[in-house]
Amino acid sequence: MNKINIIDTAQEYKNNKKNIDKAVLNVLKSGIYINGPEVKSFEDELSKFLNVKHCISCANGTDALKIALLSLDLKSGDEVIVPSFTFVSTAEVVVLLGFKPVFVDVDPRTFLIDIESIKKNITKKTRAIIPVHLFGQSADMKEIMELSKKNKLWVIEDSAQSLGSHFVFKNKIKNVEIKKFTGTIGHIGTTSFYPTKNLNCFGDGGAMFTNNNLIAKKIRLIKNHGQEKKYTYKEVGLNSRLDAIQATILRLNLKTLNQSNNKRRALAEIYNNELKSLDKILLPKYSFGIENHIFHQYTIIVKNSQNRNLLKNYLNENGVSSMVYYPKPLHKEIPYKIYNKSKLINSEVLSKKVISLPIHPLLTKKEIVWVSNLIKNFFRS
Ligand SMILES: Cc1ncc(COP(=O)(O)O)c(C=O)c1O
């Protein structure tokens, strides 16, 4: 068996080389590398795909969070609730902008922001919540939007890992279900197009989504130096742009996003079937059924934490890459621990027990079975 990587961007390029070469060459020939028609078309196509009024691109997912926060007119010292078990950007931007991150815990089985932990941490100074749709599935947006309404809090959904997944609103009285894409439910949604993401480009990229016209206007202003017209500044802004080459690649990848998310789901089902008999691990738990999960990661919990790194090494020795997302919860990291006084037990335990297995859409059933067999061998030996 060949080496199995956690992602394979070079192969992704090879598989679609003809289309990518043509699209990138067209951009190069056009001479329009910043803003312009490719970026505009991508924004229009993605907002149509997600059924959201505004899609505004920017340079990366971290900038998207930063610009989203800047657009909400928070004051220095205002509190922003963030999960501790996430990528650093979610909390980093809060600190950079002079706000206070309030770390909350996650659910021990879904890895998603825990609603009770949010409730316990809402104070008079809380202004916003940033739920993260971690590993490709939606946080509980019904509860979060209810808390937002009740406490007058902004909600910025960090959808860097979840583009194409849904939250399902159930109306029991009318007996109907309404599905909404993650990133389109809160006041603002943000995402990243980093090469490992489900909708990816071959460099850096990001976007913000909103249905609110005023917020959209403000975001457009901020991401372009606060300029209303050329050399007329209304705000202190920054420079954050998606370039045309990345936009043209994203337009191609958007066409196959559903297909590649379906493939990830099919691969997850194979892992589920192959690994279900192992009592030494816990398989991913779904908040709303497998059809709403896009498996940015397929993350298992190794019950005995001492086995986690041993398993990782064993897979590596057998040519299989795996990752630990995340080896330490943010509230334990040097720049962030000053903001936290309480123990966030689930985040702390998970960081010792989780391991993410390869699940990118170019993998085959045979390869997933191979990885699963290695895991079975490891635990049975
Ligand atoms: C949850 C989450 N938020 C934000 C980001 C930041 O995105 P970027 O790397 O494009 O800045 C990432 C990227 O890994 C992420 O996983």
Image (spheres, helix red, strand yellow):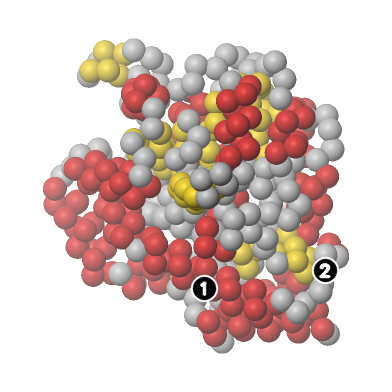
Is residue 273 visible in the rendered image? The answer is yes
| Side of 320 where 225 appears, left or right | left
- On the rendered image, what quadrant is the C terminus found in? bottom right
Q: How crowded is mark 2: few (under 14 residues within 10 Å), some or many (20 or more)?
A: some
Q: Quadrant of residue 125?
A: top right
The quadrant holding residue 281 is bottom right
Q: Residue at x 23, y 18 (%)?
A: 229
- Measured as percent of width and height from the top left, residue 143 is found at 63, 37
Look at the numbered disc 2 and say if its residue's Cβ is closer than 8 Å to ligand 1.
no
Please give the name of the residue rendered at 41% of the width and 16% of the height, measured from the top-left corner. 236
- Give the quadrant of the N terminus: bottom right
Q: Is mark 2 on a helix, strand or loop?
A: helix
Label 1: element kind = helix
**In the image, what residue type sits under mark 2?**
Asn
Mark 1 in CB contact with mark 2 (< 8 angstroms): no
| Of the pair 21 and 65, the residue shown nearer to us | 65
Residue that lies at the very extreme toward the left in this rendered image: 30
Q: Mark 1 points at which residue?
A: 266
**Horizontal side, residue 333 vs residue 220: left or right:** right
- Answer yes or no: is residue 84 visible: no
Q: Distance between the residues labelled 1 and 2?
A: 27 Å
Q: Name the residue under label 2.
A: 307
Q: Which residue is drawn at 24% across and 41% down?
A: 40
The residue lying toward the viewer, choosing from 245 and 142, is 142
Residue drawn 34% across the image and 50% down it: 49
Left or right: 165, with 148 as reference point: left
Front-most of 97 and 118?
118
